[in-house]
Image (cartoon, helix red, strand yellow):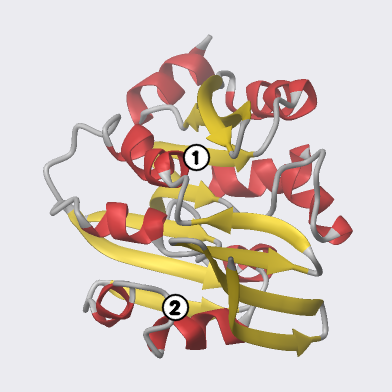
Amino acid sequence: MSELLARAVGERGELVLMRRDDALELRVNGVFVMDTAHTETERMLATATLGHLARSGGLRVLIGGLGLGFTLREVLADERVREAHVVEIEPDLVAWHRDGLVTDTANALADERVRISVGDIAAVLGEQPDGACDVLLLDVDNGPDFLVYEENSALYGPGFLRRCKDKLAPGGTLAVWSADASPELLGAMRDVFGDCTELVIPVTLGQRGTTYHLFVSHQVELEQAGLQNSL
């Protein structure tokens, strides 16, 4: 049983929020993007990166893609976070959150630590000073091999990944969400950062089992960078 909750048509096409059984579901141009029945990987996008950082406070997190808000809520649950900057290209999705159509996220957006930018992640990231982010979380599409928007393919390439590296503070972390494995993305992140860990998370969609994937890389600390430059 499904119920249409909201629909918008913009320059990138159709955006739909619906209720299917007991879950909310987000679709873009008829393509399933995410739902509230399977939120483990969206939450792990935050926990797998924040957990790596040993700092006591003042963390600056930039999130590419608001989605249904589970990554943001997990970020805000960490008291060390000073700022959570969310970049979302769809203004209607932000409005649906603020209007309370997406359960429990209106309060998250009202948190004083949250800053929302409506726009393209590449453009907004380019405006940030180098070293401005401790954690950079990218969940802007379904991954490099199952794109909702073809123009997002550049976000998984070496050029954009190098820009991410520049914006990370020493010891910072980049994590990228993907609906499928991607040897090309894994290789590109290893080339740019020198390391990348692929986390494979089993999920069940209806009667079908599959996996979602997180790709995590770390910016070197200042001491390591100095040692490498001296070699």
Q: Is residue 231 visible?
A: yes
In x, y percent, where is residue 154? 81, 50
Element at label 2: strand
27, above or below 166, in the image: below
Q: Residue at x 77, y 87 (%)?
A: 9
Q: Earlier in the sequence, mark 1 or mark 2?
A: 2
The circle drawn on residue 116 is: 2
Q: Residue at x 39, y 20 (%)?
A: 224
184, above or below 28, in the image: above
Task: Name the residue carrying label 1.
Answer: 174
Quadrant (top left/top right/bottom left/bottom right) for the N terminus? bottom right
- Check disc 1 and give the amino acid type: Leu
> Is 195 on the left-hand or right-hand side of 115?
right
- Check disc 2 and give the amino acid type: Ile
* Image quadrant in which you'd find residue 226: top left
Question: Residues under labels 1 and 2: Cα distance?
Answer: 19 Å
* Image quadrant in which you'd find residue 205: top right
Q: Nearer the viewer, residue 124 or 41?
A: 41
Q: Residue at x 47, y 49 (%)?
A: 136
How many marks overall?
Answer: 2
Q: Residue at x 23, y 76 (%)?
A: 111
28, above or below 14, in the image: above
In x, y percent, where is residue 191? 70, 22
* Image quadrant in which you'd find residue 88: bottom right
Residue sticking out furthest to the front? 1
Q: Is residue 140 visible?
A: no
Q: Estimate how packed mark 2 is, as few (under 14), some (14 to 19) or many (20 or more) residues with alpha carbons within 10 Å.
A: some
Q: Nearer the viewer, residue 191 or 206?
A: 206
> Is 204 on the left-hand or right-hand side of 221?
right
In x, y percent, where is residue 219? 46, 32
